[in-house]
Amino acid sequence: MLTAITTMDEVKVIEIKKSVFANNDKDAANLRRELKGKGVYLLNLMSSPGSGKTTTLIQTLNRIKDKLRVAVMEADIDSNVDAVKIKEATGVPSVQLHTGGMCHLDAEMTRQGLDNVPLEGLDLVILENVGNLVCPAEFDTGACRNAMILSVPEGHDKPLKYPLMFSVCDLVLVNKIDVLPYFDFDLEKCREYVRMRNPKAQVIPICAKTGEGTDAFAAWLLQEVSAWKKEE
Amino acid sequence: MLTAITTMDEVKVIEIKKSVFANNDKDAANLRRELKGKGVYLLNLMSSPGSGKTTTLIQTLNRIKDKLRVAVMEADIDSNVDAVKIKEATGVPSVQLHTGGMCHLDAEMTRQGLDNVPLEGLDLVILENVGNLVCPAEFDTGACRNAMILSVPEGHDKPLKYPLMFSVCDLVLVNKIDVLPYFDFDLEKCREYVRMRNPKAQVIPICAKTGEGTDAFAAWLLQEVSAWKKEE
Protein backbone atom coordinates (compact mmCIF):
# COMPACT_ATOMS: atom_id res chain seq x y z
CA MET A 1 0.00 0.00 0.00
CA LEU A 2 2.94 2.29 0.57
CA THR A 3 3.70 2.08 -3.16
CA ALA A 4 0.58 4.04 -3.98
CA ILE A 5 1.76 6.88 -1.84
CA THR A 6 5.34 7.07 -2.93
CA THR A 7 4.33 7.57 -6.54
CA MET A 8 3.74 11.16 -5.46
CA ASP A 9 7.32 11.97 -6.38
CA GLU A 10 6.92 15.64 -7.06
CA VAL A 11 5.34 18.07 -4.69
CA LYS A 12 1.89 18.84 -5.99
CA VAL A 13 0.66 22.41 -5.70
CA ILE A 14 -3.10 22.80 -5.36
CA GLU A 15 -4.69 26.21 -5.90
CA ILE A 16 -7.51 26.25 -3.35
CA LYS A 17 -10.78 27.87 -4.40
CA LYS A 18 -13.14 29.73 -2.14
CA SER A 19 -15.84 27.52 -0.65
CA VAL A 20 -19.38 27.69 -1.92
CA PHE A 21 -20.94 25.88 1.03
CA ALA A 22 -22.85 28.02 3.47
CA ASN A 23 -22.84 25.54 6.32
CA ASN A 24 -19.23 24.76 7.15
CA ASP A 25 -20.04 22.90 10.38
CA LYS A 26 -22.24 20.45 8.49
CA ASP A 27 -19.69 20.08 5.73
CA ALA A 28 -16.95 19.46 8.31
CA ALA A 29 -19.04 16.78 10.04
CA ASN A 30 -19.58 15.07 6.68
CA LEU A 31 -15.88 15.15 5.89
CA ARG A 32 -15.05 13.75 9.32
CA ARG A 33 -17.49 10.90 8.74
CA GLU A 34 -16.03 10.14 5.30
CA LEU A 35 -12.51 10.08 6.71
CA LYS A 36 -13.67 7.75 9.48
CA GLY A 37 -15.06 5.45 6.81
CA LYS A 38 -11.67 5.43 5.09
CA GLY A 39 -9.79 4.98 8.37
CA VAL A 40 -7.77 8.17 7.84
CA TYR A 41 -7.18 10.38 10.91
CA LEU A 42 -6.85 14.08 10.06
CA LEU A 43 -4.93 16.43 12.37
CA ASN A 44 -5.25 20.19 11.91
CA LEU A 45 -2.08 21.96 13.05
CA MET A 46 -2.28 25.72 13.57
CA SER A 47 0.00 28.52 14.81
CA SER A 48 1.25 32.06 14.27
CA PRO A 49 3.59 32.75 11.35
CA GLY A 50 7.11 31.55 12.09
CA SER A 51 6.35 29.51 15.19
CA GLY A 52 7.96 26.42 13.68
CA LYS A 53 5.15 24.27 12.27
CA THR A 54 7.19 22.84 9.41
CA THR A 55 10.32 22.12 11.47
CA THR A 56 8.17 20.46 14.15
CA LEU A 57 6.55 18.30 11.50
CA ILE A 58 9.89 17.25 10.05
CA GLN A 59 11.15 16.06 13.45
CA THR A 60 7.90 14.32 14.25
CA LEU A 61 7.35 12.68 10.86
CA ASN A 62 10.81 11.13 11.07
CA ARG A 63 9.74 9.60 14.39
CA ILE A 64 6.40 8.17 13.21
CA LYS A 65 6.80 7.40 9.51
CA ASP A 66 7.80 3.78 10.14
CA LYS A 67 4.82 3.25 12.43
CA LEU A 68 2.05 5.13 10.62
CA ARG A 69 1.35 5.67 6.95
CA VAL A 70 1.21 9.44 6.81
CA ALA A 71 0.89 12.32 4.35
CA VAL A 72 1.07 16.08 4.84
CA MET A 73 -0.85 19.02 3.37
CA GLU A 74 0.96 22.35 3.68
CA ALA A 75 -1.27 25.39 3.38
CA ASP A 76 0.38 28.64 2.45
CA ILE A 77 -0.78 31.84 0.86
CA ASP A 78 1.73 31.74 -1.91
CA SER A 79 5.00 29.82 -1.57
CA ASN A 80 5.89 26.13 -2.02
CA VAL A 81 8.88 26.00 0.30
CA ASP A 82 7.18 24.07 3.11
CA ALA A 83 5.94 21.09 1.11
CA VAL A 84 9.31 20.78 -0.60
CA LYS A 85 11.10 20.92 2.78
CA ILE A 86 8.87 18.20 4.25
CA LYS A 87 9.36 15.95 1.25
CA GLU A 88 13.14 16.40 1.19
CA ALA A 89 13.68 16.03 4.94
CA THR A 90 11.35 13.12 5.60
CA GLY A 91 10.37 11.47 2.32
CA VAL A 92 6.76 11.73 3.48
CA PRO A 93 4.31 12.58 0.66
CA SER A 94 3.39 16.23 0.86
CA VAL A 95 1.12 18.51 -1.15
CA GLN A 96 1.18 22.28 -1.11
CA LEU A 97 -2.14 24.09 -0.84
CA HIS A 98 -2.15 27.68 -2.09
CA THR A 99 -4.91 29.70 -0.47
CA GLY A 100 -4.43 32.67 -2.80
CA GLY A 101 -4.52 35.16 0.05
CA MET A 102 -7.22 33.42 2.08
CA CYS A 103 -6.50 33.51 5.80
CA HIS A 104 -7.79 30.08 6.80
CA LEU A 105 -8.99 26.72 5.54
CA ASP A 106 -12.52 25.45 6.01
CA ALA A 107 -13.83 21.93 5.44
CA GLU A 108 -14.46 22.36 1.72
CA MET A 109 -10.98 23.80 1.16
CA THR A 110 -9.51 20.92 3.18
CA ARG A 111 -11.45 18.52 0.97
CA GLN A 112 -9.93 20.13 -2.15
CA GLY A 113 -6.55 19.29 -0.69
CA LEU A 114 -7.51 15.75 0.31
CA ASP A 115 -8.74 15.09 -3.25
CA ASN A 116 -5.07 15.29 -4.22
CA VAL A 117 -3.80 12.88 -1.59
CA PRO A 118 -4.12 9.13 -2.31
CA LEU A 119 -5.92 8.28 0.92
CA GLU A 120 -6.06 4.52 0.42
CA GLY A 121 -3.72 2.86 2.84
CA LEU A 122 -3.04 6.02 4.85
CA ASP A 123 -3.49 6.18 8.62
CA LEU A 124 -2.89 9.87 9.13
CA VAL A 125 -2.96 13.16 7.24
CA ILE A 126 -1.54 16.24 8.92
CA LEU A 127 -2.83 19.57 7.68
CA GLU A 128 -0.53 22.52 8.34
CA ASN A 129 -2.99 25.41 8.35
CA VAL A 130 -2.24 29.04 7.35
CA GLY A 131 -0.02 30.85 9.90
CA ASN A 132 -2.65 32.84 11.77
CA LEU A 133 -3.95 32.70 15.37
CA VAL A 134 -7.33 34.22 14.57
CA CYS A 135 -9.26 33.00 11.54
CA PRO A 136 -8.29 29.31 11.32
CA ALA A 137 -9.73 28.81 14.82
CA GLU A 138 -13.18 29.80 13.53
CA PHE A 139 -13.47 27.12 10.87
CA ASP A 140 -13.87 23.42 11.49
CA THR A 141 -11.73 21.72 8.84
CA GLY A 142 -13.23 18.29 9.41
CA ALA A 143 -10.15 17.19 11.35
CA CYS A 144 -10.40 14.69 14.20
CA ARG A 145 -8.36 17.00 16.39
CA ASN A 146 -6.88 20.48 16.41
CA ALA A 147 -3.37 21.07 17.70
CA MET A 148 -1.39 24.28 17.80
CA ILE A 149 2.14 25.52 18.31
CA LEU A 150 2.93 28.49 20.51
CA SER A 151 6.58 29.49 20.34
CA VAL A 152 8.42 30.95 23.33
CA PRO A 153 9.25 34.31 21.66
CA GLU A 154 5.51 34.98 21.18
CA GLY A 155 4.99 35.15 24.95
CA HIS A 156 3.03 33.13 27.50
CA ASP A 157 0.08 35.56 27.42
CA LYS A 158 -1.21 34.41 24.03
CA PRO A 159 -4.06 32.25 25.45
CA LEU A 160 -5.39 35.49 26.99
CA LYS A 161 -5.24 37.35 23.69
CA TYR A 162 -6.35 34.66 21.25
CA PRO A 163 -8.93 32.81 23.36
CA LEU A 164 -10.76 30.92 20.60
CA MET A 165 -7.59 29.36 19.17
CA PHE A 166 -6.66 27.92 22.55
CA SER A 167 -10.18 26.70 23.31
CA VAL A 168 -10.46 24.68 20.08
CA CYS A 169 -7.07 22.96 20.49
CA ASP A 170 -6.57 19.74 22.46
CA LEU A 171 -2.81 19.91 22.22
CA VAL A 172 -0.51 22.92 22.61
CA LEU A 173 3.11 22.41 21.64
CA VAL A 174 5.30 25.08 23.22
CA ASN A 175 8.16 25.37 20.73
CA LYS A 176 11.63 26.97 20.85
CA ILE A 177 12.23 26.07 24.49
CA ASP A 178 15.97 26.31 23.73
CA VAL A 179 15.63 30.11 23.87
CA LEU A 180 13.70 30.19 27.18
CA PRO A 181 16.70 31.87 28.92
CA TYR A 182 16.49 34.85 26.54
CA PHE A 183 12.75 35.57 26.81
CA ASP A 184 10.36 36.42 29.64
CA PHE A 185 8.30 33.30 29.08
CA ASP A 186 6.77 31.59 32.11
CA LEU A 187 5.91 27.99 31.24
CA GLU A 188 3.76 27.52 34.34
CA LYS A 189 1.77 30.68 33.60
CA CYS A 190 1.37 29.44 30.04
CA ARG A 191 -0.02 26.09 31.26
CA GLU A 192 -2.40 27.95 33.57
CA TYR A 193 -3.67 30.22 30.76
CA VAL A 194 -4.08 27.25 28.38
CA ARG A 195 -6.14 25.44 31.06
CA MET A 196 -8.35 28.55 31.40
CA ARG A 197 -9.28 28.19 27.74
CA ASN A 198 -9.45 24.39 27.55
CA PRO A 199 -9.07 22.35 30.73
CA LYS A 200 -8.58 19.16 28.67
CA ALA A 201 -5.73 20.53 26.58
CA GLN A 202 -2.34 18.91 26.91
CA VAL A 203 0.82 21.06 26.82
CA ILE A 204 4.06 19.59 25.46
CA PRO A 205 7.23 21.72 25.51
CA ILE A 206 9.44 21.05 22.48
CA CYS A 207 12.44 22.33 20.58
CA ALA A 208 11.85 21.55 16.92
CA LYS A 209 15.39 22.64 16.01
CA THR A 210 17.02 19.94 18.15
CA GLY A 211 14.06 17.53 18.25
CA GLU A 212 13.72 17.75 22.04
CA GLY A 213 10.18 16.87 23.13
CA THR A 214 9.03 15.73 19.70
CA ASP A 215 9.16 12.12 20.95
CA ALA A 216 6.24 13.10 23.20
CA PHE A 217 4.36 14.64 20.28
CA ALA A 218 5.02 11.49 18.22
CA ALA A 219 3.74 9.34 21.10
CA TRP A 220 0.62 11.53 21.37
CA LEU A 221 -0.06 11.06 17.65
CA LEU A 222 0.44 7.27 17.75
CA GLN A 223 -1.84 6.98 20.76
CA GLU A 224 -4.49 9.27 19.22
CA VAL A 225 -4.63 7.43 15.90
CA SER A 226 -4.70 4.04 17.60
CA ALA A 227 -7.49 5.03 20.03
CA TRP A 228 -9.50 6.60 17.20
CA LYS A 229 -9.20 3.49 15.02
CA LYS A 230 -10.70 1.45 17.87
CA GLU A 231 -13.68 3.82 18.28
CA GLU A 232 -16.98 2.69 16.78
CA MET B 1 -4.66 71.61 24.34
CA LEU B 2 -2.84 68.78 26.06
CA THR B 3 -5.29 69.14 28.96
CA ALA B 4 -8.08 67.83 26.79
CA ILE B 5 -6.10 64.69 26.18
CA THR B 6 -4.91 64.02 29.70
CA THR B 7 -8.44 63.98 31.03
CA MET B 8 -8.49 60.44 29.60
CA ASP B 9 -7.30 59.10 32.91
CA GLU B 10 -8.72 55.62 32.65
CA VAL B 11 -8.17 53.34 29.76
CA LYS B 12 -11.34 53.30 27.71
CA VAL B 13 -12.44 50.01 26.25
CA ILE B 14 -14.41 50.23 23.03
CA GLU B 15 -16.35 47.22 21.77
CA ILE B 16 -15.96 47.47 18.00
CA LYS B 17 -18.96 46.53 15.89
CA LYS B 18 -18.87 44.90 12.48
CA SER B 19 -18.83 47.41 9.62
CA VAL B 20 -21.90 48.00 7.55
CA PHE B 21 -20.15 49.79 4.69
CA ALA B 22 -19.70 47.80 1.54
CA ASN B 23 -16.99 49.98 0.06
CA ASN B 24 -14.09 50.03 2.48
CA ASP B 25 -11.67 51.72 0.08
CA LYS B 26 -14.01 54.67 -0.34
CA ASP B 27 -14.66 54.85 3.38
CA ALA B 28 -10.92 54.75 4.08
CA ALA B 29 -10.27 57.57 1.61
CA ASN B 30 -12.97 59.65 3.35
CA LEU B 31 -11.47 59.00 6.77
CA ARG B 32 -7.99 59.92 5.51
CA ARG B 33 -9.38 63.21 4.15
CA GLU B 34 -11.13 64.00 7.43
CA LEU B 35 -7.97 63.30 9.42
CA LYS B 36 -6.02 65.55 7.05
CA GLY B 37 -8.55 68.28 7.75
CA LYS B 38 -7.95 67.86 11.47
CA GLY B 39 -4.16 67.69 11.08
CA VAL B 40 -3.99 64.24 12.69
CA TYR B 41 -1.60 61.71 11.16
CA LEU B 42 -2.72 58.09 11.57
CA LEU B 43 -0.20 55.25 11.52
CA ASN B 44 -1.40 51.65 11.21
CA LEU B 45 1.03 49.26 12.90
CA MET B 46 0.67 45.57 12.10
CA SER B 47 2.48 42.31 12.93
CA SER B 48 2.14 38.66 13.95
CA PRO B 49 1.03 37.85 17.48
CA GLY B 50 3.87 38.35 19.94
CA SER B 51 6.28 40.20 17.68
CA GLY B 52 6.55 43.09 20.13
CA LYS B 53 4.18 45.83 18.93
CA THR B 54 3.31 47.12 22.40
CA THR B 55 6.89 47.10 23.72
CA THR B 56 8.08 48.86 20.56
CA LEU B 57 5.40 51.49 21.03
CA ILE B 58 6.36 52.07 24.66
CA GLN B 59 10.01 52.71 23.75
CA THR B 60 9.08 54.92 20.83
CA LEU B 61 6.34 56.92 22.56
CA ASN B 62 8.78 57.81 25.33
CA ARG B 63 11.08 59.20 22.63
CA ILE B 64 8.46 61.28 20.80
CA LYS B 65 5.88 62.30 23.39
CA ASP B 66 7.60 65.64 24.13
CA LYS B 67 7.79 66.46 20.44
CA LEU B 68 4.43 65.25 19.14
CA ARG B 69 0.98 65.17 20.74
CA VAL B 70 0.14 61.51 20.35
CA ALA B 71 -2.52 58.97 21.33
CA VAL B 72 -2.69 55.22 20.84
CA MET B 73 -5.49 52.79 19.92
CA GLU B 74 -4.77 49.18 20.88
CA ALA B 75 -6.83 46.61 19.02
CA ASP B 76 -7.19 43.22 20.61
CA ILE B 77 -9.68 40.42 20.33
CA ASP B 78 -10.42 40.31 24.00
CA SER B 79 -7.94 41.61 26.59
CA ASN B 80 -7.13 45.13 27.88
CA VAL B 81 -3.54 44.53 28.90
CA ASP B 82 -1.94 46.46 26.05
CA ALA B 83 -3.75 49.79 26.52
CA VAL B 84 -3.07 49.66 30.25
CA LYS B 85 0.61 48.88 29.64
CA ILE B 86 0.97 51.82 27.23
CA LYS B 87 -0.73 54.22 29.62
CA GLU B 88 1.32 53.11 32.61
CA ALA B 89 4.68 53.04 30.86
CA THR B 90 4.38 56.25 28.84
CA GLY B 91 1.48 58.35 30.16
CA VAL B 92 0.29 58.60 26.56
CA PRO B 93 -3.52 58.44 26.21
CA SER B 94 -4.54 55.01 25.06
CA VAL B 95 -7.85 53.35 24.23
CA GLN B 96 -8.47 49.64 23.93
CA LEU B 97 -10.46 48.42 20.95
CA HIS B 98 -12.09 45.01 21.37
CA THR B 99 -12.75 43.38 18.03
CA GLY B 100 -14.86 40.58 19.52
CA GLY B 101 -13.07 37.89 17.53
CA MET B 102 -12.70 39.90 14.34
CA CYS B 103 -9.35 39.37 12.67
CA HIS B 104 -8.67 42.86 11.35
CA LEU B 105 -9.79 46.48 11.43
CA ASP B 106 -11.23 48.30 8.46
CA ALA B 107 -11.83 52.04 8.06
CA GLU B 108 -15.23 52.04 9.75
CA MET B 109 -13.93 50.08 12.74
CA THR B 110 -10.97 52.46 12.97
CA ARG B 111 -13.43 55.35 12.94
CA GLN B 112 -15.32 53.79 15.87
CA GLY B 113 -12.05 53.89 17.80
CA LEU B 114 -11.19 57.44 16.73
CA ASP B 115 -14.61 58.62 17.92
CA ASN B 116 -13.32 57.88 21.42
CA VAL B 117 -10.07 59.78 21.07
CA PRO B 118 -10.15 63.57 21.57
CA LEU B 119 -8.46 64.43 18.27
CA GLU B 120 -8.28 68.18 18.79
CA GLY B 121 -4.71 69.18 19.39
CA LEU B 122 -3.28 65.78 18.45
CA ASP B 123 -0.56 65.37 15.82
CA LEU B 124 -0.45 61.61 15.66
CA VAL B 125 -2.57 58.57 16.44
CA ILE B 126 -0.97 55.15 16.31
CA LEU B 127 -3.28 52.21 15.72
CA GLU B 128 -1.95 48.86 16.90
CA ASN B 129 -3.87 46.46 14.68
CA VAL B 130 -4.86 42.85 15.54
CA GLY B 131 -1.86 40.48 15.62
CA ASN B 132 -2.23 38.82 12.24
CA LEU B 133 -0.08 38.85 9.07
CA VAL B 134 -2.95 38.04 6.72
CA CYS B 135 -6.27 39.83 7.09
CA PRO B 136 -5.23 43.30 8.33
CA ALA B 137 -3.18 43.73 5.12
CA GLU B 138 -6.36 43.47 3.04
CA PHE B 139 -8.20 46.38 4.65
CA ASP B 140 -7.28 50.05 4.28
CA THR B 141 -7.85 51.56 7.73
CA GLY B 142 -7.68 55.15 6.50
CA ALA B 143 -4.15 55.49 7.89
CA CYS B 144 -1.57 57.74 6.23
CA ARG B 145 0.94 54.91 6.32
CA ASN B 146 1.21 51.25 7.18
CA ALA B 147 4.15 49.94 9.16
CA MET B 148 4.82 46.43 10.41
CA ILE B 149 7.03 44.57 12.80
CA LEU B 150 8.72 41.32 11.87
CA SER B 151 10.52 39.71 14.78
CA VAL B 152 13.71 37.70 14.36
CA PRO B 153 12.26 34.42 15.72
CA GLU B 154 9.61 34.44 12.97
CA GLY B 155 12.30 34.04 10.29
CA HIS B 156 13.56 36.13 7.38
CA ASP B 157 11.38 34.27 4.87
CA LYS B 158 8.12 35.92 5.95
CA PRO B 159 7.97 38.40 3.02
CA LEU B 160 7.87 35.34 0.75
CA LYS B 161 5.00 33.78 2.67
CA TYR B 162 2.87 36.84 3.48
CA PRO B 163 3.40 38.91 0.33
CA LEU B 164 0.47 41.32 0.68
CA MET B 165 1.43 42.43 4.20
CA PHE B 166 4.91 43.37 3.05
CA SER B 167 3.71 45.12 -0.11
CA VAL B 168 1.33 47.44 1.77
CA CYS B 169 3.91 48.50 4.39
CA ASP B 170 6.35 51.38 3.89
CA LEU B 171 8.30 50.58 7.03
CA VAL B 172 9.40 47.20 8.35
CA LEU B 173 10.80 47.15 11.87
CA VAL B 174 12.87 44.01 12.45
CA ASN B 175 12.48 43.46 16.18
CA LYS B 176 14.29 41.26 18.74
CA ILE B 177 17.70 41.71 17.13
CA ASP B 178 19.21 40.90 20.56
CA VAL B 179 18.44 37.23 19.87
CA LEU B 180 19.96 37.18 16.36
CA PRO B 181 22.77 34.86 17.57
CA TYR B 182 20.23 32.19 18.54
CA PHE B 183 18.18 32.12 15.34
CA ASP B 184 18.90 31.43 11.67
CA PHE B 185 17.82 34.91 10.62
CA ASP B 186 19.66 36.58 7.75
CA LEU B 187 19.09 40.33 7.90
CA GLU B 188 20.42 40.88 4.36
CA LYS B 189 18.13 38.21 2.94
CA CYS B 190 15.27 39.81 4.86
CA ARG B 191 16.02 43.22 3.32
CA GLU B 192 16.16 41.62 -0.12
CA TYR B 193 12.79 39.85 0.34
CA VAL B 194 11.18 43.05 1.69
CA ARG B 195 12.44 44.93 -1.40
CA MET B 196 10.90 42.25 -3.64
CA ARG B 197 7.49 43.10 -2.16
CA ASN B 198 7.92 46.87 -1.85
CA PRO B 199 11.04 48.51 -3.28
CA LYS B 200 10.27 51.74 -1.38
CA ALA B 201 9.97 50.09 2.04
CA GLN B 202 12.50 51.05 4.68
CA VAL B 203 13.87 48.41 7.07
CA ILE B 204 14.90 49.42 10.59
CA PRO B 205 16.40 46.76 12.92
CA ILE B 206 15.38 47.31 16.54
CA CYS B 207 15.35 45.69 19.96
CA ALA B 208 12.23 46.90 21.74
CA LYS B 209 13.34 45.28 25.00
CA THR B 210 16.47 47.46 25.27
CA GLY B 211 15.28 50.34 23.07
CA GLU B 212 18.05 49.83 20.51
CA GLY B 213 17.02 51.22 17.13
CA THR B 214 13.84 52.84 18.36
CA ASP B 215 15.54 56.25 18.02
CA ALA B 216 15.47 55.60 14.28
CA PHE B 217 11.78 54.68 14.37
CA ALA B 218 11.08 57.84 16.41
CA ALA B 219 13.01 59.93 13.86
CA TRP B 220 11.05 58.31 11.02
CA LEU B 221 7.76 59.21 12.73
CA LEU B 222 8.79 62.82 13.41
CA GLN B 223 9.94 63.25 9.82
CA GLU B 224 6.78 61.60 8.43
CA VAL B 225 4.37 63.71 10.45
CA SER B 226 6.27 66.91 9.69
CA ALA B 227 6.43 66.21 5.92
CA TRP B 228 2.73 65.25 5.87
CA LYS B 229 1.72 68.44 7.69
CA LYS B 230 3.48 70.46 4.96
CA GLU B 231 1.66 68.63 2.14
CA GLU B 232 -1.22 70.45 0.52
Image (cartoon, coloured by chain):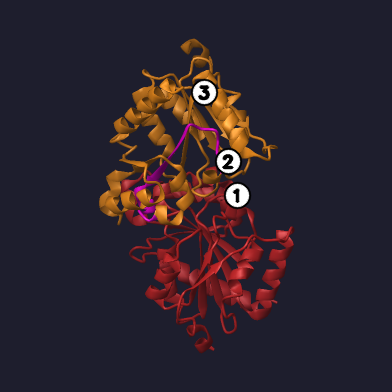
Chain colours: A orange, B red
Q: Secondary structure at mark 1?
A: helix
In the picture provided, is B95 more to the left or to the right than A193? Answer: right
Q: CA distance from mark 3 to mark 1?
A: 37 Å
Q: Secondary structure at mark 2?
A: loop
Q: Amino acid at mark 2?
A: Ile
Q: For residue B114, which numbered disc appears in the image?
A: none
Which residue is rendered at x = 61% and y = 66% of the image? B110
Amino acid on which disc 1 is placed:
Leu
Looking at the rendered image, the disc whose residue lies closer to the viewer, 2 or 3, is 3
- Residue A39 inside the magenta-drawn segment: no
x and y percentages locating residue B195 in the rendered image = 55, 51
Q: CA distance from mark 2 to mark 3?
A: 29 Å
Question: Which numbered mark, 1 or 2, is in the foreground of this view?
Answer: 2
Judging from the image, mark 1 belongs to the subunit labelled: B
Task: Specify whether residue A72 is in view.
Answer: yes
Please state the chain letter of the residue tagged with numbered disc 2 in the rendered image: A
Left or right of B186 in this view: A140: right
Tell whether A222 sits left or right of A182: right
* Amino acid tagged 3: Lys
Q: Which residues are magenta?
A: A139-157
Residue B20 or residue A167, whichever sits in front: A167
Q: Residue at x 51, y 16 (%)?
A: A5
Q: Given contact means CB atoms under 8 Å apart, are the residues at marks 1 and 2 in contact? A: yes
In this view, the residue farthest toward the front is A232
CA distance separating discs 1 and 2: 10 Å
Instruction: From the image, tell me which residue sits under label 1.
Output: B164
Point out which mark residue A36 bears. 3
Residue A77 bears which disc, if any? 2
Residue A110 appears at what percent x and percent y?
58, 32
Q: Are marks 3 and 1 on the same chain?
A: no
For marks 2 and 3, the one nearer the N-term is 3
Q: Secondary structure at mark 3?
A: helix
